[in-house]
């Protein structure tokens, strides 16, 4: 897919690529997910850089970083916090959990049970958590990167559809190409102890998020998007089609990808670039396994044949 990232974002991508060699497109898509106001789910085998991506993305964005290592015995209160009785003060006091941060890495999220996974639902949708009928507002922006190991691994609990739908995009990182891997093996990769400096201020982050909202969609492009959405629901190829949340996520990512290229309007190429990563965790083929490439090929082959 042809695209050209705007020069104003190149330093940010370069800074992260020092630690995640050869993954510029992955980094760019992660940035687009953030600026679109969504959350990101990374599913891949251990050791390919999921945690590295989250760590350095938070640093260059200048966001407070929090990490939760999910385990099978974790409880919702370990994430959200709890009220405890303070004997000295003679009253209950709320102790915040690790979710109270701007950038949350939910590491190996599918190693916890569904009741623990569900602790993130309200936070990811509304930016608040409710404890004992009291709502607590989370910092803005609030961005979650969830990582999970392949479902075939022992000790994992599949994320329910309601949780999957909270993530705007999902993709893997994959192995590096041969040249990038050689650089890593030679030790050319940036020292892991080197801390990337924040390259964007909070006001710049807010500005870019507002720019995404202002990206325009032509009537023809809206027709294209609605044709895709309708196909997922009416083709009888998938178990169920895109929800309204999924349709809004697709629209937001199209706008954000256009903004990352320095444009205030979106094109059909933007739609083709992001559709599979917005849909791959939401759509399941009736007769078998789903992959992002298969989702892309199924949708666009059919849409183009109908036009």
Image: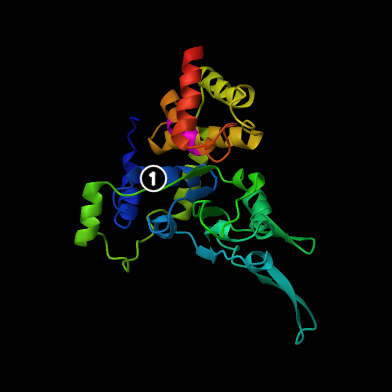
Q: Give the residue displayed 55% in from the left and 42% down from the top.
A: 168
- Is 228 above or below relative to 200? above
Q: Position of residue 116 (x, y in %)?
A: 66, 60
Asked whether, in this view, residue 82 is left or right of residue 220, the answer is: right
Asked whether 287 or 52 is in front, the reply is 287
Looking at the rendering, which quadrant does residue 74 occupy? Answer: bottom right
Q: Is residue 68 magenta?
A: no
The prevailing secondary structure element of the residues shown in magenta is helix
- Is 11 above or below relative to 282? below
Whether residue 67 can be seen here: yes
Looking at the rendering, which quadrant does residue 129 occupy? Answer: bottom right
Asked whether, in this view, residue 303 is left or right of residue 9, the answer is: right
Q: Residue furthest bottom?
A: 88
Q: Give the residue displayed 56% in from the left and 62% down from the top.
A: 101
Q: Position of residue 303 (x, y in %)?
A: 50, 19
Q: Give the residue displayed 24% in from the left and 50% down from the top.
A: 180
Q: Give the residue displayed 60% in from the left and 22% down from the top.
A: 235
User: What color scheme is it?
Assistant: rainbow
Badge 1 element? helix
| Residues rendered magenta in the picture | 273-277
Asked whether 111 or 5 is in front, the reply is 111
- Is 276 above or below relative to 44? above
Q: Is residue 275 magenta?
A: yes
Q: Residues within 10 Å of mark 1 (few under 14, many from 20)?
A: some
Q: Position of residue 244 (x, y in %)?
A: 65, 33
Give the residue pinned by disc 1.
26
Asked whether 87 or 216 is in front, the reply is 87
Q: Position of residue 75 (x, y in %)?
A: 67, 66
Asked whether, in this view, residue 239 is left or right of residue 302, the answer is: right
Quadrant location of the N terminus in the rendered image: top left
- Is 152 above or below relative to 186? above
């Amino acid at each position: 897919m042809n695209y050209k990232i705007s020069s104003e974002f190149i330093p940010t991508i370069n800074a992260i690529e020092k630690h995640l060699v050869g993954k510029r497109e992955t980094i760019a898509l992660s940035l687009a997910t953030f600026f679109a106001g969504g959350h990101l789910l990374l599913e891949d085998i251990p050791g390919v850089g999921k945690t590295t991506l989250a760590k350095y993305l938070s640093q260059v964005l200048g966001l407070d970083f929090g990490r939760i290592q999910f385990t099978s015995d974790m409880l919702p209160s370990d994430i959200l916090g709890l009220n405890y009785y303070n004997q000295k003060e003679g009253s209950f006091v709320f102790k915040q959990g690790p979710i109270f941060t701007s950038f949350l890495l939910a590491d190996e999220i599918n190693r916890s049970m569904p009741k623990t996974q569900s602790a993130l639902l309200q936070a990811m949708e509304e930016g608040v958590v409710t404890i004992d009928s009291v709502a607590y507002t989370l910092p803005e922006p609030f961005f979650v990167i969830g990582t999970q190991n392949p479902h075939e691994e022992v000790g994992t609990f599949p994320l329910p559809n309601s949780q999957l739908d909270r993530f705007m995009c999902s993709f893997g990182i994959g192995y590096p190409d041969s040249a990038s891997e050689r650089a890593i093996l030679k030790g050319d990769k940036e020292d892991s102890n080197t801390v990337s400096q924040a390259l964007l201020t909070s006001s710049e982050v807010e500005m870019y998020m507002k720019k995404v909202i202002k990206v325009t969609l032509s009537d023809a492009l809206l027709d294209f998007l609605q044709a895709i959405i309708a196909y997922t629901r009416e083709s009888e190829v998938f178990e169920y089609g895109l929800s309204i949340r999924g349709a809004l996520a697709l629209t937001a990512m199209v706008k954000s990808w256009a903004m990352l290229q320095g444009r205030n309007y979106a094109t059909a190429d933007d739609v083709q670039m992001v559709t599979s990563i917005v849909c791959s965790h939401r759509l399941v083929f009736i007769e078998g396994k789903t992959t992002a490439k298969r989702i892309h090929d199924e949708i666009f082959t059919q849409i183009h044949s109908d036009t």
